């Protein structure tokens, strides 16, 4: 009950702050970019507040818990991308002065057609980004309240949707600044308490490196919950090859498939995975059955295959359950679903190596994250709320400090979780570590700390989801309705359209959130970044720095890179859900992490097509470049959209 | 100075600064995976419980980007002031 109290508290504070700030939101300009007068400190807090989503708050800690070192690239990429934004994009974009990326797209090429193309990506990226927020809401409520996954999504999603429909952007600038500080407090303070209870950060990591082959164990009999085939691939449980594992099923169970964790290499004998379970099981396993799971020795023509150290290589079975079931893992057993300490704590572990191309995977991930940050529409729109280019740069610096301070805490959660709550691996619940770990202390203090992190998680998906709803609804109301469908629309009509759009997109996001329960939160956000990296990033980079870019070139590159990346990611998601199969591991790796080809492809297409269509370079390209680059004091910059108070 | 020359010189100076800082940043982030690959022992060196590569990526990387960012902003603002001064003459 205590965590729920904290959650309700932060929700009410958000709504009240939103309402109070809304009373001051008057004109259409207030509604879209907060009147373009927000102080650097406030704006940096608000950008950070909006940026630190459920993916950052729950997902990054969860992904580091699950994948160790390999997952450290996520927080680093999320934070470091701002440097590229600062170096190449923030200053020019602010000087150009437009509300949204579609405004930039149209203004740079004087092409309303290009606006329509550009605006579509606000929606693609936005939906990819809202899915993990929704998953975060579902998982958080599952952990705190024991609600079914979908209930959390519907309740939280509805509250935020209506808050946005009432408030607009002015409301949330203030609210998001507030939420940043809630999140920083919630990720940091409990960590210090946990370290006092469980031991320090470097101490935990030192234990892992001291025992490279070690795997976490449960210290007492631990109840496990397994999901069924409908939640594939999360219904798979990989047992440890290190020693035998004893589990007792406490519910009638049916196993859909048994396979070995290690895929046989060429020449190796095919192993009968069913031999690894004693007693042999067939059909429905009645409740109360105790089974022992044994590692199998990998053989080649009947002879054991030896590892580099000269020991026989062993593999353990992977069980896939047909229906949800429950079991008890005996005290002292190795925890299923995790790798050994060396694979966890050192580079090129299970995450990047899963398709067999660890280096390619790593670089592709880095490119997606650092270029993607520089192309996120809901973040870029915030730079227009700075009074000038200089303050836009100062804001970026403070954002980097604020979010870096936050992300530095996420690996600590991963390390503590691995050492002290390894049952999260067995249950495929790594995404809930920030809420579950404090609670594991027990007693009132466990509940209070868990309440603090729950409140942080709520602040996280409320602020990001609000920001996304504003940018998507803004795109619809301002770019599609106001510029394309009904240019004569009055400001009142636009605000009405904004509210309708917020409600539509809110419900669409909830529906999408229900589909993604099996994906890691941080990976889902990574995909939004990959799409942004291959579409908006090339547009902004070349648009700001290359005079010769033409509208057809920019459009072809953005569509080519962006849509192919989107398609590749969707193909990977379908294959992960076992709807389609991708056999070739290289193709699979490139589908999961498309940035390594998507970003260069978009840049090359933009370059080549622009060269071919060089006649279409805007006649006033020099003037536009001056507006992007000449310091404001020279008087060359002019806001693309003149602010006249109530209309524009 | 006419517009075209002004544009060319402004952009060249801005791009030079941005590219210099970007080279340091991208250098660090792109070389670390190579160190992990070709010098795994070096990457795994124990530094007070942390492995060296964990310490760099999970702890030190953030202050490094702050430093780069602060340096860039200082230089970039100075550059803009210089451009304004030259053209006001």
Image (cartoon, coloured by chain):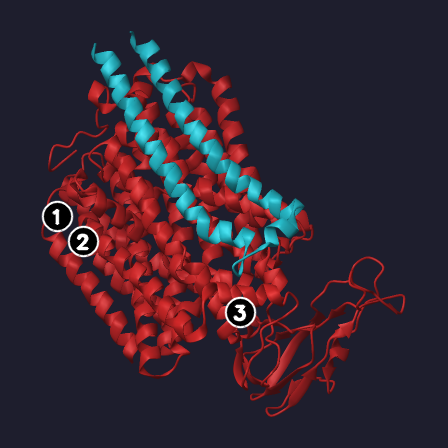
Q: Chain of mark 2?
A: A
Tell me: residue A12, above or below residue A48.
below
Image location of residue A240, percent across then percent down: 66, 73
Q: In the figure, the red chain has which letter?
A: A
Query: Can residue B71 be seen in this snapshot?
Result: yes
Image location of residue A57, percent across then percent down: 38, 60
Give whichever of discs 2 and 1 has the lower sequence position.
1
> Of residues A236 and A158, which is closer to you in this image?
A236
Residue A562 appears left or right of B68? right
Query: Can residue A99 be seen in this snapshot?
Result: no
Label 3 packing within 10 angstroms: few (<14), some (14-19), many (20+):
some
Q: Residue under circle 2?
A: A167
- The local secondary structure at tag 3 comes to helix
Give whichever of discs 3 and 2 has the lower sequence position.
2
Q: Residue under circle 3?
A: A231
Residues at discs 2 and 1 in contact (Cβ within 8 Å): yes
Q: In the figure, the cyan chain has which letter?
A: B
């Amino acid at each position: 009950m205590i965590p729920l109290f904290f959650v309700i508290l932060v929700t009410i504070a958000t709504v009240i702050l939103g309402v109070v700030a809304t009373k001051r939101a008057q004109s259409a300009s207030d509604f879209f970019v907060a009147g373009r007068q927000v102080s650097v400190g406030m704006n940096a807090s608000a950008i950070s507040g909006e940026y630190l989503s459920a993916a950052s708050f729950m997902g990054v800690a969860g992904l580091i818990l699950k994948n160790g070192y390999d997952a450290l690239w996520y927080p680093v990429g999320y934070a470091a991308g701002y440097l590229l934004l600062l170096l190449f994009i923030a200053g020019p974009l602010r000087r150009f002065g437009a509300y949204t990326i579609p405004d930039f797209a149209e203004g740079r090429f004087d092409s309303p057609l290009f606006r329509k193309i550009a605006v579509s990506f606000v929606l693609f990226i936005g939906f990819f980004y809202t899915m993990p927020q929704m998953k975060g809401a579902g998982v958080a409520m599952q952990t705190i309240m024991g609600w079914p996954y979908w209930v959390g999504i519907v309740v939280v999603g509805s509250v935020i949707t209506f808050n946005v429909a009432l408030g607009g952007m002015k409301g949330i600038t203030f609210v998001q600044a507030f939420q940043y500080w809630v999140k920083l407090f919630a990720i940091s303070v409990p960590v210090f308490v946990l370290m006092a209870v469980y031991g320090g950060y470097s101490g935990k990591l030192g234990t892992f490196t001291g025992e490279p082959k070690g795997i976490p164990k449960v210290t007492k009999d631990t109840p496990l919950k397994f999901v069924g085939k409908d939640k594939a691939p999360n219904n798979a449980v990989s047992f440890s090859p290190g020693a035998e594992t004893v589990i007792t099923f406490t519910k009638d169970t049916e196993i859909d498939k048994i396979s070995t964790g290690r895929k046989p290499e060429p020449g190796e004998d095919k192993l009968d995975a069913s031999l690894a379970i004693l007693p042999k099981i067939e059909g429905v396993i009645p409740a109360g059955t105790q089974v022992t799971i044994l590692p199998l020795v990998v053989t080649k023509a009947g002879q054991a295959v030896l590892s580099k150290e000269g020991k026989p290589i062993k593999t353990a079975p992977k069980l896939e359950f047909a229906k949800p079931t429950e079991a008890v893992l005996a005290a002292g057993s190795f925890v299923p679903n995790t790798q050994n300490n060396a694979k966890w704590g050192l580079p090129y572990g299970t995450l990047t190596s899963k398709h067999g191309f660890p280096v390619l995977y790593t670089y592709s991930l880095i490119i997606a994250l650092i270029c993607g940050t520089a192309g996120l529409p809901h973040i870029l729109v915030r730079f227009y709320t700075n009074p000038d280019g200089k303050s836009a740069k100062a804001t970026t610096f403070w954002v980097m400090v604020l979010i870096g301070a936050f992300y530095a805490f996420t690996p600590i959660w991963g390390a503590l979780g691995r050492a002290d709550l390894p049952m999260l691996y067995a249950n495929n619940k790594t995404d809930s570590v920030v809420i579950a770990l404090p609670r594991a202390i027990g007693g009132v203090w466990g509940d209070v700390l868990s309440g603090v992190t729950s409140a942080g998680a709520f602040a996280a998906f409320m602020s990001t989801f609000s920001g996304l709803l504003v940018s998507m609804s803004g795109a619809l109301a301002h770019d599609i309705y106001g510029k394309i469908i009904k240019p004569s629309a009055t400001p009142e009509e636009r605000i009405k359209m904004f509210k309708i759009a917020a409600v539509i997109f809110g419900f669409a996001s909830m529906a999408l959130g229900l589909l993604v329960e099996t994906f890691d939160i941080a990976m889902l956000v990574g995909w939004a970044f990959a799409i942004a990296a291959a579409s908006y990033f090339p547009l902004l980079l070349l648009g700001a720095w290359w005079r010769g870019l033409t509208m057809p070139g920019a459009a072809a590159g953005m569509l080519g890179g962006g849509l192919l990346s989107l398609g590749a990611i969707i193909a990977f998601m379908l294959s992960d859900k076992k709807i389609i199969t991708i056999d070739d591991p290289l193709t699979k790796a490139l589908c999961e992490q498309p940035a390594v080809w998507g970003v260069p492809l978009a840049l090359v297409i933009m370059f080549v097509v622009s060269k071919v269509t060089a006649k279409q370079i805007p006649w006033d390209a020099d003037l536009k470049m001056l507006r992007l680059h000449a310091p404001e004091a020279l008087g060359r910059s002019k806001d693309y959209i003149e602010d006249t108070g109530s209309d524009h | 100075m006419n517009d075209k020359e002004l544009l060319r010189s402004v952009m060249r100076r801005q791009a030079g600064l941005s590219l210099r800082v970007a080279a340091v940043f991208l250098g660090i982030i792109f070389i670390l995976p190579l160190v992990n690959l070709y010098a795994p022992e070096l990457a795994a060196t124990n530094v007070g419980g942390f492995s060296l590569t964990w310490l760099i990526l999970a702890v030190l990387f953030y202050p490094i980007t702050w430093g780069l960012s602060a340096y860039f902003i200082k230089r970039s603002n100075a550059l803009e002031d210089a451009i304004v001064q030259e053209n006001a003459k």
